[in-house]
Image: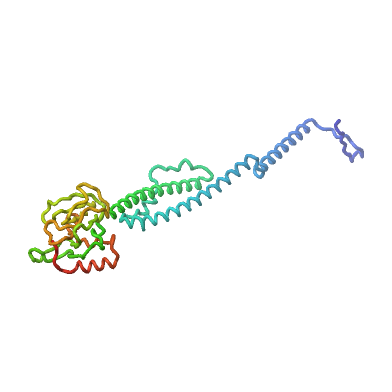
Amino acid sequence: MSKVKYYYDSETLSYRKIERKKGNTIKYGFIFLLAAGLFGFLIVFVASQFIESPRERALKHELTNLQLQYDLLNKQVDNAFAALESVEERDNNIYRLYFEANPIPEEQRRAGFGGVNRYNKYEGFDNSKLIITSNKRIDQLQKAIVVQSRSLDEIAILAEDKEKFLASIPAIQPVKNEDLKHMASGYGYRTDPFTKVRKFHFGMDFTAPRGTPVYASGDGVVKRADSNSSGYGKHIRIDHGYGYVSLYAHLYKYNVKANQKVKRGDLIGYVGSTGRSEAPHLHYEVFKDGERINPINFYYGNLTAEEYARLLEKASLENQSLD
C-alpha cells in the first residue's frame, strides 16, 4: 500500500492531501530510469578502465612475460655475438694469417638482407619494433655463423694441406750424423776430382762407408730408381709434390722401386760409389720447380742448431768434390 503524502496549506491553515498527477509519475519514472542507466554506464565505464577482468589480467601477464623473454633472448644474442666476434678475430688474425689466406672483411661478415621486407609480417602490433629488432639480430647472427663456418671449413682444408706440405718437403739430412765420416763438399763452385777444373757443384756430398743407409728426406713417390742418368750411377729420385724433387746418387743398391710411396725417414738405399764417383759417398740434390737449389736450407728436420751451424761452415768451404 502506497504512502499518502500531505502538504500544509498556509491559506486554509490545514493539511491537504497531495494528489499525484499521472503525467508527472511517468515523467519522474523516465527521469529515474535515465539516471539509473547513466549511472550504470558510468559504473561499467569506470570498471572497464580501472578494474581488470581475469582475461585481461592473463593477457597482460602473458605480454609482460613475452617482453621478458625477448629481453633475455636479446641478451643471449649479445653473448653469442661476443663469442662469435672472438672466433672471428682469431680466424682473421691467427688462422687465416698463418695459412696465408685473405681475412674476411667485416662488411661481408655483417652484411644485411636485401630485397623484399622480410619483417612486414611483424608490423602492426603493440611491440612490433621489439619483435622486428630481435628477429633482425637473430638473422644477422645466423648469417655470421654460416660465414664463419665456411671460413673454418676452408681453414681445415688449408691446415690439412699445410700438414701434408710440411711432411712432404725434403727437410732432413739423408744420412745420419753418426754414420758420416765427414761432409765432403757443399753446394757451389768446387774443383772437379777428375778434370781438376773449377765448376759448379749442384748438390752436397756426404762421405760414408759403402752400405751406409740412405733415408728419404720427405714424403713422396719414387719416380726413378735406376742408373740411366749420366754420371749419377745408381740413383733415386723422389717427387715430393709442390714442385720439390730430391735426388740420391752413386748408390750401392736400392731399397725401393719406381712408383713406390715413401715417408720421410724411410730407408731407400745404401751409400756406394757407382757412376762418376771418386770414393763412396752420397751425392744429394734438391730441385724446386725444375731448378737445383741448395739442400742445406732444408735440414731443420733432424739437426740441432749447433749441428746445423757446423754443417753450414763445412759446406761453405770451397774444396774438391767427390763427383
Which image quadrant for residue 278?
Answer: bottom left
| Number of callouts | 0
Is residue 170 found left or right of 64 in the rendered image?
left
Is residue 322 found left or right of 65 in the rendered image?
left
Which image quadrant for residue 120?
Answer: top left
* Foreground of the two, 66 or 235: 235
150 to 12, vertically: above or below: below
Q: In which quarter of the image is the N terminus?
A: top right
Where residue 69 sits: x, y (%)? Answer: 54, 47
Where residue 17 sits: x, y (%)? Answer: 88, 34
Where residue 314 sits: x, y (%)? Answer: 21, 68
Q: Which residue is drawn at 18% across and 69% down?
A: 317
238 to 34, vertically: above or below: below
* Foreground of the two, 45 or 90: 90
Q: Which residue is drawn at 21% across and 61% down?
A: 295
In the displayed image of the protein, which residue is found farthest to the left? 195
Q: Residue at x 45, y 47 (%)?
A: 138
Q: Residue at x 7, y 64 (%)?
A: 195
Where residue 176 sits: x, y (%)? Answer: 25, 60
Q: Quadrant of the C terminus?
A: bottom left
* Foreground of the two, 32 or 202: 202
Which image quadrant for residue 306?
Answer: bottom left
* Foreground of the two, 305 or 61: 305
Q: How is the image coloured?
A: rainbow
Is residue 57 found left or right of 220 in the rendered image?
right
